[in-house]
Amino acid sequence: MKKNTLRAVVLCLSILLCFIAAGQSQNQGVLVIEGGTLIDGNGGQPVRDALIIVRGNRIETVSRKGQASYPAGAQVLQADGKFIIPGLMDAHVHYDEYMAELMLNNGVTAVFEIGGGGELGLARREAINRGKIPGPRLFLAGGSIAGARIAALGGYSPLAGPLASRVVSTGPEMARQVVKRFIEAGADMIKVHRGPTAEEYRVAAEEAHNAGLPVVVQPLGPHVYAREAVLAGADILEHAAGVEYSVARDPSRWEGWGQTEAHSLSPVPYVDMDDAKARDLIQLMVQRGVALEPDLVCKGRGLFIGPEWRAKYELLDYRLLSDPALAYLPERQRIKWLRNYVEFDDAPAAEQEQRRQGLRNMMRFIRMFHEAGGKVLAGTDTPGWAVAGQSLHYELELLVEAGLQPMAVITTATKNTAEAFRILDKLGTVEAGKLADIVVLNADPLQSISNTRSIEWVIKDGKVANHGYHRWFKTPFVDSGVEGLNWFSALKQQTMNEDSNWAFGWPPPGIGGISPGFVKEGGPDLTIRLTGVNFVIKSVVTFEGRPVPTRRISNTAIEATIPAHLVAAPGTYSVRVVNPEPLQRTEWNNGTSNRAFLVVDFRY
């Protein structure tokens, strides 16, 4: 009897503990933002004393204080006196791992990698979405379709190998197949770069739209500019590209301008803007629902529209980049960001003023477009021309300077961007049912758009993001493919031009490809194949600096076996080929090849 009683007591306690645990687990997933003024991203009247309940990673309820109840154990953020906006979106990014904290600390919870991203981008996107690594939501093009001009700079075949950043199309059917390939790989959008014909644009848009994806374009000729791209089915004009040529009084004056890399981001052709042509193009874009992503912070870099703008932004960037906690930023990138401000210092005064006048006219076009009902998107083209994260706030300020009201500017980095990229059902506004990406500000952005920089909390995917910068910050997916391909090409050419016996000793090795380049964690011993030049009988492959079993196949192919324990954890691993002494041509990296990268992805 005692034994049965004891069992009953234990059973009751177990059931009670299960109920308690269940209640706690339910409450642990609830986040509440109580109080504050909600600017929900729709452009309507702000809501005072808001109450937002987030369960898991979704917004469950948006109401007023006292109008809804929430669990006693919920995490509550008291937001009285603060201002709530949707998580910000940067509509034009070339994403890299070191940007994660820069983006999140600046309230940027989603970015659009419209340059491609490739297989490495797909791995990053998946890891971020599954909470394995920190970062903003990542939306990818996978790669882009380019024309013959890009071929001259070194394009990639779409028929073999991994996703390429730029694939050169040779006709409409090839463009169609490339788009299908990107869609199959998991692209969130389709990007058409400079060079393709109008028919290639049209086919790409047709395939993308059939799959429900938006088309982002950079139509800088020689066949297609803004008007032709809009007629072909484009959804988003990146950089507002091609507009300057489509609205020029004398298009012949600018023939070929955009084909030169130095001119591709220049606002100078806007000095020739014809307002009648501008209104006609705007009407067409609005009718067709084409969004404008201008990148003013990129187009105006170093000069902007006056010296006071440069002085302000240059100082803000210098202060940020001097933070010791950001020591992990690549030095070359830090220098590039600061050098952007001096890029045109040596240009003649007349040329500087011409750029400023072009930028002013571009901003006037944006205002005209907005007033006609057009959708403007906020983007930066980071990291090439603007500091990741922080520069999005500069872009918002420049859009206000262009003539948009702060409320409208907030929508450029929230609702408009989500709508243009066809994800408004998930993001872009603070509404019940949407993913919980929210920023809480300490000051009113409607009084001054600069207050978007006064951030108290960033909520991404229903969780309060870790604030601040950390010098130990590191994520696993750093690089992929092969580093130093220009170096390799030069070595290969040198090898072909020289006699097979340059001199006494072993020749310098070089790597041109690695296969596989991506594997999953936790697999067995791995055999990789490297292709390149000057692999000799005594060549040794090193993995993160340590020799591994090597088998030479030929002068241009070599295999190595990586023990399972070395590829057990996700990360980016360096692979080289080392040739022994005696060496010839030591100036070619002293007998050590360039690096190839093996990416070990998470196994989900």
Image (spheres, helix red, strand yellow):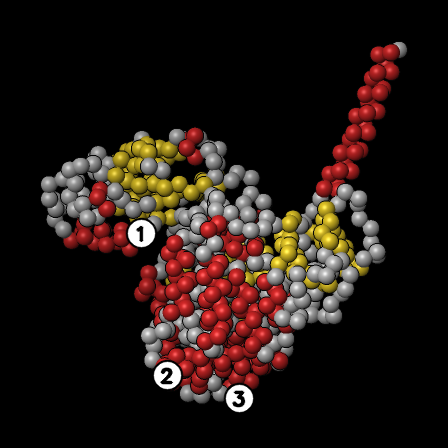
Is 471 on the left or on the right of 399, as rendered?
A: left
| Label number found at residue 424 | none
| Label number found at residue 350 | 2
The location of residue 65, given as percent across then percent down, is 81, 57
Q: Is residue 83 above or below residue 356?
A: above
Sooner in the amino-acid sequence: mark 3 or mark 2: 3
Q: Which residue is mark 3?
A: 276
- For the residues labelled 3 and 1, say whether their Cβ atoms are less than 8 Å apart: no
* Spatial separation of the CA atoms under disc 3 and disc 1: 49 Å
Amino acid on which the number 2 mark rests in the picture: Ala
Q: Nearer the viewer, residue 340 or 549?
A: 340
In the image, what residue occupies the spot 81% across and 20% down? 10
Is 326 on the left or on the right of 413, as rendered?
A: left
Tell me the crowding category of disc 2: few under 14, some 14 to 19, or many 20 or more residues within 10 angstroms, Cα based: few
Amino acid on which the number 3 mark rests in the picture: Ala
In the image, what residue occupies the spot 39% across and 50% down? 161
In the image, what residue occupies the spot 70% across and 61% down? 82
Q: Nearer the viewer, residue 509 or 173?
A: 509
Sooner in the amino-acid sequence: mark 3 or mark 1: 3
Q: Does the rendering let one see residue 418? A: no
